[in-house]
Image (tube, rainbow, N blue to C red):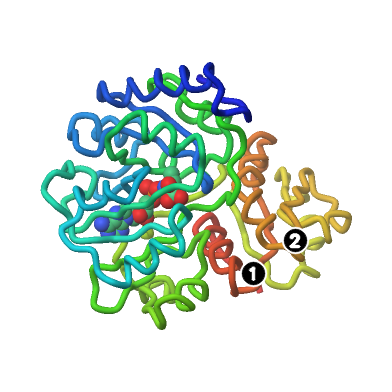
């Protein structure tokens, strides 16, 4: 673990980042912080290096990775075509939590794109990530640095918990900010298509380029998503998660599950935390500020694992703004919904 502190341009920090970057250049995998979640990075131009990411995470090989860059000029080496809408979006949202999909060039290692003709690229808005990427000098393919299926990591400790012994090292830059993964938008289509809601909202994108399309699979559970990663159950704690629309039902659900001999958890916010008598009650941010919910969601889900909770009842959030990304992750974590 290389711990990088706040005074991050210090000699000591730069030395640590150079060391981590050297491993990437040598074809090893390194976890590093971004503003969304921690990523597990390897040289995106080297097939053998990229394969190690899939091995470390236990990730299905049909699920493509996002390539991270530090400077816009790196994009031209990776993609065959940069549409005007993409240029506008990059101007507004890069660096930031927006991943754009382009037609790819052949230099991109085949595993990165899982055999697709397109490649996903983003420029993270995080000093440590950017410094590391600059030192590495190569585009870095990086999925979230969790074991496949687990909640994404928002601290270096989460990464350590999931991947110790499976990767070369972790750059510890503290807790990430946004807390949910980037928004994924396919710009290789005539009208851009939203594949994954995330840190940048649909409204924010449309304010810049006008109406976009939404992958039908995001709206209906019986459709196959265009983005391979969206089809897997995901972000799940060990316990079974139920989403509860009517929060007034939660106390009853809790006592019944307790009677069944289960260890019971409730995922709520600071507003309602006093209302429940479960074994573990986790207040995940405030409803008044959905950014705080996003930021704490994954660490909250992991708390239930730490406490060996078997059944989790989760409050729901409005399907608007950041709420859409929050609900998308909760739905993937959940086994079902109670009205
Ligand atoms: O915020 C983030 O995006 C984080 C940080 C580390 O940057 N990364 C991340 O990566 O969330 P990952 O691998 O967990 O999610 C990548 C998503 C998956 O759903 C994948 O299927 C989709 O992007 N994706 C990647 N390339 C694609 C492509 N060419 N076409 C369609 N979907 C693609
Ligand atoms: Mg992931």
- Residue at the spot of label 1: 338
Single out the residue that lies furthest toward the right: 274
Q: Secondary structure at mark 1?
A: strand
Q: Secondary structure at mark 2?
A: helix
Residue shown at 59%/71% (left/top)?
Answer: 321
How far across and down, in percent of the image, does residue 248 sit? 80, 70
Q: Is residue 213 visible?
A: yes
Residue shown at 66%/66% (left/top)?
Answer: 316
Q: Nearer the viewer, residue 240 or 35?
A: 35
Q: Residues within 10 Å of mark 2 (few under 14, many from 20)?
A: some
Indicate which disc, 1 or 2, sits on the residue closer to the N terminus.
2
The answer to whether marks 1 and 2 mark residues whose Cβ atoms lie closer than 8 Å is yes
| Quarter that holds the C terminus | bottom right
- Residue at the spot of label 2: 253
Q: Quadrant of residue 19?
A: top left
How far across and down, in percent of the image, does residue 208 sit? 44, 75
Single out the residue that lies furthest toward the left: 106
* Left or right position of 83 against 181: left
Badge 1 residue CB within 8 Å of ligand 2: no
How far across and down, in percent of the image, does residue 69 sit? 34, 44
- Residue 261, relative to residue 247: is it above or below? above
Q: Is residue 228 visible?
A: no
* Left or right position of 323 against 25: right
Between the residue at mark 1 and the residue at mark 2, the CA separation in whole angstroms equals: 10 Å
Residue shown at 21%/52% (left/top)?
Answer: 76
Count of marks placed on residues: 2
Q: Quadrant of residue 119?
A: bottom left
């Amino acid at each position: 673990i290389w711990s990088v502190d706040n005074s991050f341009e210090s000699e000591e920090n730069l030395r640590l980042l150079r060391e981590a970057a050297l491993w990437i250049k040598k074809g090893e995998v390194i976890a590093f912080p971004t503003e969304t979640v921690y990523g597990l990075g390897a040289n995106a131009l080297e097939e053998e290096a990229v394969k190690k990411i899939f091995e470390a995470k236990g990730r299905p090989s049909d699920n493509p990775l996002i390539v991270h860059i530090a400077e816009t000029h790196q994009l031209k080496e990776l993609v065959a075509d940069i549409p005007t809408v993409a240029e506008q979006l990059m101007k507004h949202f890069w660096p930031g939590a927006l991943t754009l999909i382009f037609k790819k060039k052949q230099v991109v290692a085949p595993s990165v794109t899982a055999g697709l003709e397109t490649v996903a690229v983003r420029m993270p808005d995080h000093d440590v990530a950017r410094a590391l990427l600059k030192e590495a000098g190569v585009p870095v393919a990086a999925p979230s640095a969790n074991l496949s299926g687990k909640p994404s990591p928002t601290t270096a400790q989460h990464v350590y918990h999931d991947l110790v012994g499976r990767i070369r090292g972790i750059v510890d830059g503290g807790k990430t900010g946004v807390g949910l993964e980037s928004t994924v938008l396919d710009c290789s289509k005539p009208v851009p298509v939203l594949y994954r809601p995330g840190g940048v909202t649909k409204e924010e994108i449309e304010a810049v380029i006008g109406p976009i399309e939404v992958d039908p699979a995001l709206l209906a559970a019986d459709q196959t998503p265009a983005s391979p990663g969206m089809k897997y159950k995901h972000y799940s704690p060990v316990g079974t998660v139920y989403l509860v629309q009517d929060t007034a039902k939660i106390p009853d659900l809790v006592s019944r599950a307790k009677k069944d001999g289960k260890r019971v958890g409730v995922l709520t916010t600071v507003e309602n935390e006093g209302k429940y008598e479960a074994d573990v009650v986790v207040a995940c941010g405030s409803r008044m500020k959905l950014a705080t919910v996003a930021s704490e969601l994954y660490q909250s889900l992991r708390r239930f694992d730490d406490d060996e909770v078997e059944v989790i009842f989760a409050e729901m959030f409005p399907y608007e703004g950041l709420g859409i990304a929050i609900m998308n992750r909760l739905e993937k974590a959940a086994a079902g919904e109670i009205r």
